Every structure is written in C-alpha cells, then in structure tokens.
Amino acid sequence: MALSTRHLLGIKDLTPADISLLLDTAKQFKEVLQRPIKKVPSLRDVTIVNLFYENSTRTRISFELAEKRLSADTINFSASGSSVSKGETLLDTVNNILSMKVDMVVMRHSASGAPHFLAKHIPAAIINAGDGINEHPTQALLDAFSILEKYDTLKGVRVAIIGDIMHSRVAQSNIYLLTKMGAEVVVCGPPTLIPKYIDQAFDVRVEYNLKKALEWCDVANVLRIQLERQNQVLFSSLREYNLVYGINRKLLDSLQKKITIMHPGPINRGVELDSDVADSDQSIILQQVENGVAVRMAALYLLAGDRNSS
Amino acid sequence: MKSLLNAQHIQLTIKRLANQVLENHTNPEQTVLIGIQPRGIYLSDRIAREVQAEKGGSAFPYGKLDITFYRDDLRKELHVPNQTDILFSIEGKKVILIDDVLYTGRTIRAALDALMDFGRPQKVELLVLIDRRYSRELPIQPDYTGKSIDSIVTQKVKVLWNERDGKDEVVLMD
C-alpha cells in the first residue's frame, strides 16, 4: 500500500485510492496531535527544506509544525533575504540545497508548474505548497478531511466554491479532489471571475446567483478575492463584491438549512465573509487549520524515504 | 501447515492467562490493559472480557495502541496506521501489553517507545498467546505466555480469530 506518485504536485495526478490513503493516514495523525507528547519519531532521519518563494503564514507554519511533529529536521528558505535577490536561478538554488543532503522539498512559488519543473531535475521528493494559479493539493486534502469530519463521507456532499475561481489554485485542487471522490460541485462568483467553459472542462455546475448556490449546497467553501493576482479590475469595487457575493448573517439565516462555512484563509473580513459569519458556529475555518497539520503529516509520512515497493 | 491450537485450546489458554493476570494484579485502580494493533486487539478484547468475567466489579481500563509510527523499518516498507485509543493516563500505572505472537521482539520495542510518549508507567508487562522462543532479535521476554513454540525463520505462525477469519485457530505455516 503506497501512493501511486513519488511527489505530491497536484490532485490531478492522484487516484481516488491515493486520496483515501492520505485521508485515512491523516486521521491517525490527528489522534497523535491529541496526545500529551505530540511527536512521533518516524521521520527523524529526514531533512526537509521549506522553499517558499511566495508569502505565507498558515501553510508555512503548518508544514513546519507537521515536519517537527514527525521529528524531521527542517530548513526554512524564503526568497527575500536570500541569493535570489542576487539573481540565482531556481534550479541552482535547489541543487545547492540538495548538495547539503536535504531529502525532501516543500515548495511554494508564484509560477505555475515550478514544482513540476523541479521534479524533472532533482532526485528529492517534492510537495507542492501552491504554484501560481495551478494547484494547492494539501489545502484541498485538508478541506476534504474537514468535510469528512462533519459529514462522514464525501460522496454526494454538495459543495459550493465561491469567489475568484479564475485565479484560485485552492479552487482548482478542490474541484479535482471533490469530483474524483464523488462530491457534487458548484462554482459561484461574478462571471468575470469564473473561467469560460469550466463546466465543460470539469464536472462542475456554474451558478452566478449566490443565494441559489447557498440554498443548494451543504458546504460553502469561500475564497479570498485575490487582489495581488489581477492585472485588470474584474469587478467595480470591494464594496460591490460584498453586496452581491459577500456572505452575511442575514443571508445565512434566510436559508432552509444550516450550511457549513469554510475558507482557506486569510479572510478579507467584510468582503467575502462578514465577521459574524466567519466567527459563527457554522464556520469550521479554525478546524481546517488544525486539520492542516495532520494532513501535511500524512503527506510527508507517505512520501518520505525510498521503499522497495516503489 | 500444522495446527498448533484449536478453538477449545485457545479458550482454555485465554482463561488461564486471565487468571494469571488477576493473580498478579489485585489492585484494579493501578492496572491497565493495552492491545497492540492490528492483530493483538482480538486477543486483548478477549482477555479484557475474561478478566472482567472472573473479577467482577469495575473493569481494568482497556486501550489499543498502534505502533506504525515507531517502527524501525519505515524505509523498507510502508505500513498504514490503525486506530490508537488510549483514553486514560498511564502515568504511574502497571501496563499489560497484549499481542498475539512474540517473534523478533521489534514490535514490542516499538510499543515501549510509543508507551513512553503517553506517560511514565510504573511497570510494563507483556502478555502473548504464542512465544516463538529462540527467535528474538532484541532482549525482550513475555511475562504471561499462552504457548511456547520452536520455529525456524522460514516458517510463519498465524493466529486466526473468529471475528475476522471465521474460526479460532493457531497454525504454523511453512
């Protein structure tokens, strides 16, 4: 029993069996995190470099905690304050680090496909912590884990992904994972933020009306408006976005059932989510963060080391 | 393939082991039973039940321990972890580890490491159904033994349980 891939570059390459294995293993790691000593010695012979070319709070800390709880040694690299400012290339940077006998690379980069490029050129196992607007596989896995905790299954669960679908690697990974595992997916947002023909490329439905999407769904995964990714203004103002696509208490109370609210973070309070929604008992946003460590421990554990079977 | 213990034997052995445990552990507050995943739990379920039946009153706290993350052969083969359920403290308690077959002793070594991360027990004892004696790779010995057998490295001892395999039997396979 092992993963079918050597790296975790995207949900696109994973089979449903891989996803189940990751989620089952994450469940056991979550139990470890409840123990008095939240540490296991499994990866004590492994050194991992966290190669973050882009800003991050949650993901970086989550990966670092996961690595430490597995007793691995960790090195943190952020592009600012490194030789990248002197013009060192990605491949040179990584090869230099690997010469110091680092076993695994966890990588976040603003260019889509950067980890795939790296995977072709270096022997270490690579985990994609977010590449451009392509994928963010561990986020999708922890989202799925959080849904599983609440609903006991993914099959047939109705998930509405709301917001800037076009520029969101979280949305892309979630769409791959949820459709592979039999969930029903609707994407909702302003037409300027939803790729044309997305419902032909993937098994998703498009809904431009927020209330209809919320009335249909069991879970709403709300994305942040990604201001830093846009070259042109795709909606007139944040205020208008909030009026039409923001989720507030009044809207939630008007629905027939209590839906679950998720958000990958960081939240733009007052834009996509109002505070009384983000902090309510319908929101599992903080549980998502807690589950992130367990899920990343599972990914690291399953990818570490060479095994005779692979 | 040779049958070492049949269902009746197993039942008698479990009864005897349970009574041996009770002989040595007269203070119920101080002792806990922990079965080792994945196969030790079938034995530990029965031991816990038998001990309770013989003893009456309140049961010993009973938990299950998975040792996958403490194994020493992680780079050789991937093992999928099972559930660990230890909902009580083991600090200062006498722990009885329960597994079906004791062979090289590496599983028990891993179990001891795992236990230490839950607290500092007063004492740890080992209860096994089958002891493949003279096959140890580490200095580990059982305190309560169902049956000792001699076997060679090419053989395998398998314990079949009614709950999982449809019958109770211990077999020696070549």
Image (tube, rainbow, N blue to C red):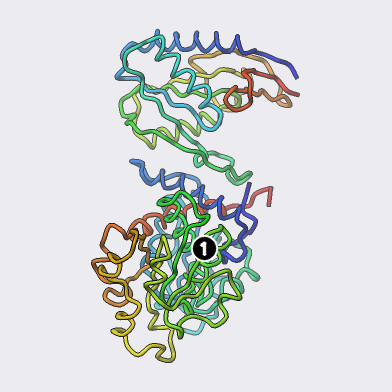
Q: Residue B89 at what x, y percent from top left?
A: 32, 31
Farthest left residue in view: A276
What residue is shown at x 50% (from left), y 29% (from top)?
B36
> Which residue is nearer to you in this view: A199 or A88?
A199
How crowded pointer 1 is (Cα within 10 Å; few <14, some 14-19, many 20+) is rated as many
Rendered view: A293 above or below A123: above
Q: Residue A178 at what x, y percent from top left?
A: 52, 62
Label 1 SS: strand
Q: Residue B137 at what x, y percent from top left?
A: 60, 27
Disc 1 marks which residue? Answer: A184
What residue is shown at x 55% (from left), y 71% (from top)?
A94
What residue is shown at x 39% (from left), y 10% (from top)?
B24
Q: How many marks?
A: 1
> Which residue is nearer to you in this view: A296 or A156?
A156
The amino acid on which the numbered mark 1 sits, given as a three-letter code, is Glu
Quadrant hosting residue A203: bottom right
> Which residue is nearer to you in this view: B145 or A85?
B145
Subunit of label 1? A
Farthest front residue in view: A256
> Which residue is nearer to you in this view: A281 or A132?
A281
Quadrant hosting residue A265: bottom left
Rendered view: B140 above or below A143: above
Quadrant hosting residue B12: top right
Q: Residue A133 at what x, y percent from top left?
A: 50, 77
Horizontal relation, residue B43 to residue B158: left or right: left
